[in-house]
Structures are given as C-alpha cells and as structure tokens.
Image (cartoon, rainbow, N blue to C red):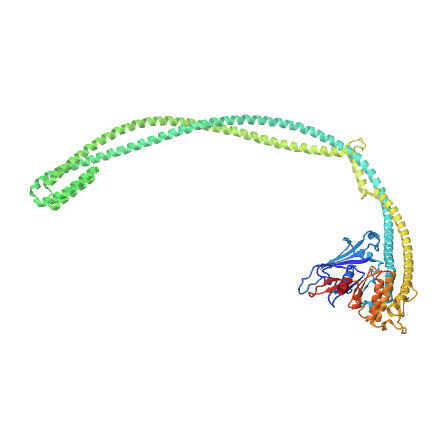
Amino acid sequence: MRLKSLKIAGFKSFVDPIQIDFPGIMCGIVGPNGCGKSNIIDAIKWVKGELSPKSLRSESLQDVIFNGSDTRKPVSHCSVELFFDNSENFLGGEYLEFDEVSVKREMGRDGQSNYFINNTSARRRDVQDLFLGTGLGGNSYAIIEQGIISSLVGAKPEELRSYVEEAAGISKYKERKRETESRIRRTSENISRLKDLEDEVKRSIRRLNAEANLTTKYKKLRDKEKEYQKFILTDDMNGLLKLMNESEKENKSIDKDLEKIDGDRLAFVAKRDVNKTQMMESLKKLEEEQRGFFESGAKISLIEEKERTVANRIEELSKEEQKNLVNLEDLSKELDSAKSDLSKIDEKVMQGIMNDSKKITQSIESNLNKKDSDLIEKSLKEFWKKGYQYGLGESGEAVETINVLRGQFASRNEQILKDKEFMKKDLAKEKLELSDLIETRKSQELKVIELRSNQDKANEEMRTIEAEITKLESEKERIMQQRNEKEVNKRTIEIDIKEKQERLETYLEVKDIDGDRDSVVQDLEKLQKRIMNLGPINFAAPETLEAEKERKETLSGQIEELETSLSKLDEAIRKIDMESNKSFHTCLNSVNKYLEEMFPKLFGGGFCKLDLLDKSEDAGLILMARLPGKKNTKLSQLSGGEKALTALALVFSLFSINPAPFCLLDEVDAPLDDDNTARFINLVNEMSEKVQFIFVTHNKISMEKSSHLLGVTMRDLGVSKVVSVDVEQAMELAQS
C-alpha cells in the first residue's frame, strides 16, 4: 500500500484545487522557506482526523481554511482527499476488494467537518479505525515533523511505549479492549438497571394481583347490572314505541286539518281573484264615467265663461253707443256756432287753423279705426283748444271737420248695433248648448255615484275575503307549528328508540329477568352503590398482570444472559491483555534487534537499545545509546545531528517491524552534515523497497537520491503552487 495522490482545495496556502501525485517511492518536496511545503504534511495529518490546532501549526482549527491574501479573497471551506493504492490488499475487511481507497475531509467556517471513505459518508472514528495498526494511527511514527525528531529521543517512557505498541499493532488490541471495557460498563449498568426493573416488576405483580381480583369482582357486579339495565331498557323501549304510535295518529289528524284549511283557503283565494277581476272592470268604468263627468263640467265652465264675456262686451258697446250719441249732439251745437263765427276769421289765420285741423282730423280718423271713442273725444277737445288759440273756433274748415266727425260717429253706432245683435244670437245658442250639457252631467253624476257605491261594496267584500284568508293562514301556521312540535317529539322518540335499540344490541348475550320495574330499579340502585364502593378499577389489570409476569421472566433471562456475557467479556479482556503484552514484548525484542543493525549503519558503529522502566505490565520505555568511540552519555547531551540520527534509527527500526503505507519526513536531514546525510539517505533508499518515503528537504544530496521531486512555489504572496519534476527524466535531459 502506498499514497498515490493528494487533492487539496482551500487548505492553508493551497487555495486553488490541485492534485499532487506521488508516482515514486522516494518523493522529495522542495522549495524556498515559507512557500507552503510543510502545509502538505499538515494536510495529510488533517485528513486523518487531527483536531489539535497546535499540531497543525494553527491557533484555531478554522485557521486551516485559506484566509485570503493581498490578491485573493478568503474561501468558505476547505477539503483534502488522500488516494491509496490497495492493490496488494493492505487494507482488509470491507475494503479488501478495492484496489484504490480514498479518504476525504471537508470543513466550513463553522468548524463542522465531514468525512468520506470511498465517497461514502463516514465518521471520524471510522477514518481512525481504518488506520489502526498500520503505523498511521493515533501514535503514528510514520509522520516525523520538524522538531519532533529531536524530541523523540527525549520522549517520556510512556510515549516511547506508545510508539512500540503502534508498531506491534497493539492499538487494535487497545481499541478492542476499550470497546470491551465499554461493553462491560454498559453491561454492568444494564444488569443493575434490569435488576431494578425486576424489583419494580415484582412490586407491580403484587399490586396487579389485588387489582385483578377487584376487577373480577367488579365484572361480576357489572354483569348483574347489565341484566337490570336490559330489563329497564326493554321497558323504556316499549313505552317509546307506544308514544310513537300515538304521535303518528296525532300527526295524521293534524294532516287532515291542514288539508281542510288548504281547501278552504284555495276557495277563498279563487273567490278573491274573481272579485279582483270584477273590481278592475268596475274601476275602469268608473274612471271612464268620471272622465266624462269632468269633461262635461269643463265644457260648462267654458260656456258660462263665454256668456259672461259676451254680456260684458254688449254692456261695453251699449255704453260706447250712448257716449257717441252725446258726442253727436255736442258736435251739432258746435257746428252751428262755427258757422256763425266763420265770417269773422282772417284768411291767414284760417290757414294755420286749417293746418292744425288737418292734423286733428288725421288723429280722429286714426282713432276711429281703433274704435276708441275716448280718443275721438280727446282729439275734438284738442281741436277746439287749437281753434281757440288762434281765435278761430268757428272757422269754415272746422265746420267741415265736424261734419266728417258726425258721419264717423253715426257709422260707428251702426257697427255697434250690428255687433250687439250678433253677440245676442251667439249667446242664445250657447245657452241652449249649456242646458244640454247640464242634463248630461246630471246623468253622469248619478252613474259615478252608483259605480262608486258598487266599488265600495266590492272593496268591503274583498277585505272580508282577505280577512278570511289571513285567518286561515294564521290557523294553518298554528297547526304547522303544532305539527312541527309533534314532528320534533317524534324525531326525539325515534332517536331514543334507535339509541336504546343500539344499547339493547349490546345486551343480546345478557339473560332476561322477570319482575316489576320498581323492584328492578331499587335493586339496580343498590348494585350501583356496591360498584361505587369498590373505588377505581384497573380493567387492564388481568392482562397487565400476565404481561408483567412475562416481563419478569424476560428480565430474569436477560439478566442471566448479561451476567454470562459479562463473564465472557472479562475473559476477553484477560485474553486481550495477554495477547497485547505478548505482542508488545515480541515487538520490543524485534525493535532492539533492528536497532542493533540500524544504529551502526547510521553512526558507523555504536550501540542503541530500548529497555523497560520497571517490571510492571504497562511499564514505560527508556532509550539508551552509546556512540562509537564515546563513553555512555545522556541522550540530552547529544548534538542535534546525533539526536536526529538516533531518532531515525528508532523510527526505521519500527518501520522494519510494521512498515506503514508511507513515511513523511519534514526536514529531518536539516541538522545533518553531508556524510551523515549520505548515510541517512542511503538507508532511506534501502528501506524504500518496503516503504514509500515522502520528505521535505533542502539538502542537495537528498534531492539527488529522490526519484521524483515536487517543487512548491509562491509566486503570488500567500498562495502556493506545485510543480512536479521526474528526476530521472531531468537527469537524462541534462546529460543530452
């Protein structure tokens, strides 16, 4: 099994998704300081389930997510995925059939991690269990970081023991032991809990026995109560059936009354409709007669008004006639006077008078056309005023004018006489027509009075019919209300009958008893008092009692099984301790054997050994070493290079016992000189036949021995990039 590739996205300085392939067995990771080389090591540790920020060189776990740079924004999550070649079936169990196994971890800013094995959701523990006993477990010796190589030499005894246990595969035993101990605790707790439950069940059985006896007694009393209740229900049923029959009879009688009322009402409605038709016809006649009566009255009024107008006009003409006669007499007198004075008037003056006379004459003629005698009189007075003005009251022209005026007055009187005669004839005709209209109006008035009387009689009859209809409807409503009440009572009785029938169906298997109702009711009351005195009844007590008995048997069986299982678990713990102790000592001997070989190879001689601190089963280990040409010294007094080589001798010895899928070395060759580096890299090359090595280095010797180089750069500040280089191809290109 080896590491094929690594996918990183958003982890520390590796913000962009990238896949890093590890095609060789010796892969070197190179690059300048601070470019992110060690972040690859941290990514591998993180995907294995590491939770310590310190171990990942961070202040918090969220710091592993790319937090931004001058040119790049922060990201919200990160992911790392490892791909393993499992073609040799290194990982067994459920992954035995897979040639490739992937392990993935994702995390967001909320700190919540998600794990996947072969793209299937998994738990952190599942990932850790996957690597148990492979050298990549919790106490992994396959990942040697900066600073750890020297601290490994000075590790505490219990820490050194944990590395040996990991190499021995005891971590699997310890995990099994922890699980077994956990099962023992759970089993002990279950036994204790089950015993408590058993005691509780025993108490419950005692209580349920008493309750079951009480229930049995209660059921017997209830059975007797059912016999009494059946008797009462049957009696009630018979009474309800009787009431039902009576109700149906009453309803039939009510229905007959309703039919009669409906018949009477229909008769009155028909009569009302006939009367309505007759009233409408009578009303039309009345309206026609009234219309004629009012028209006759209007005509009479018009004729009377016309008669008054004609009489008034005749009277006015008579007055005008009398006035004209008076004027004619006055004109005759003035004519005689004018003739006597005519000789006295000067010709020149006479001419002025003539001119004024013409004007007056024209005025008189104009007024005569208008038939206004008052205006004629006014003109004459004006004429004589002018005549007197000139001193010509009896001029010859005036005489002529007076004669003309007399003729006009005479003509006007003749016209008045003609008009009066015509008006008198027309008035006689109108009086005759008026007499006929008065007679007609009297006849119409009598008809209207008659029709109105008939209409009043019809209205009275209609009111009588409506009153009868209203009375019948009120009676029907009363009877319908009574009918509804009866129907409600009937429905109530039907419901009671149905309810009691249903109840009686539940008493089919209850035997019938004889007796009278009163005695049965008394016996039932006494029985119910006895039932009440029993108190609360647990009806489920008999069934619960049987269930509790079965439960007790089950609990007893479970306790027995758990106690047996506890004994087996104790035995399993003992066997695990024996197997793990045996495996530990076997592994310790093997490690010391390889240390005897590895240490001289690295130092050119010398001696190194792991020894138990004491004789206890879980005793820690101490590391002892003697360098060639030197006396035994304390490990703390060794130089940095000596400590590094000593630690590498221990690590390589552990790998020889239980090779991990791969080994990660982070600048472990930094404190070594060229000679020691050469010995170190040669040993690595030798062991690469069994183990894949991935190491971070700045040493040229280590680089030259690598089969594949991964160059890590940081062109953009804070963002790492990876460039892959095949060393052999590079060398061939350089030589050509």
Task: Reply above or below: 341 against 581.
Answer: above
When asked about the image quadrant of residue 101, the answer is bottom right
Q: Locate the N terminus and report the quarter of the image it occupies.
A: bottom right
Q: Which residue is most to the left?
A: 343
> Is 68 left, or right, of 432 in this rendering?
right
When asked about the image quadrant of residue 550, the answer is top right
Task: Reply above or below: 146 against 490.
Answer: below
Whole-percent x, y for residue 76 in the image: 70, 59
Whole-percent x, y for residue 566 in the image: 89, 53
**Which of 605/443 is in front?**
605
Which residue appears at 53% of the width and 26% of the height? 270
Can residue 432 be seen by looking at this rendering? yes
How many numbered marks does the figure carry?
0
**Which of 410/265 is in front?**
410
> Is 145 left, or right, of 355 in this rendering?
right
When asked about the image quadrant of residue 479, the answer is top right
Whole-percent x, y for residue 45 in the image: 78, 61
> Is 589 left, or right, of 34 in this rendering?
right
Can residue 145 be seen by looking at this rendering? no
Whole-percent x, y for residue 257 in the image: 61, 27
Task: Reply above or below: 70 against 319.
Answer: below
Q: Which residue is most to the front?
A: 736
Q: Locate the C terminus and report the quarter of the image it occupies.
A: bottom right
**Which of 569/313 is in front?**
569
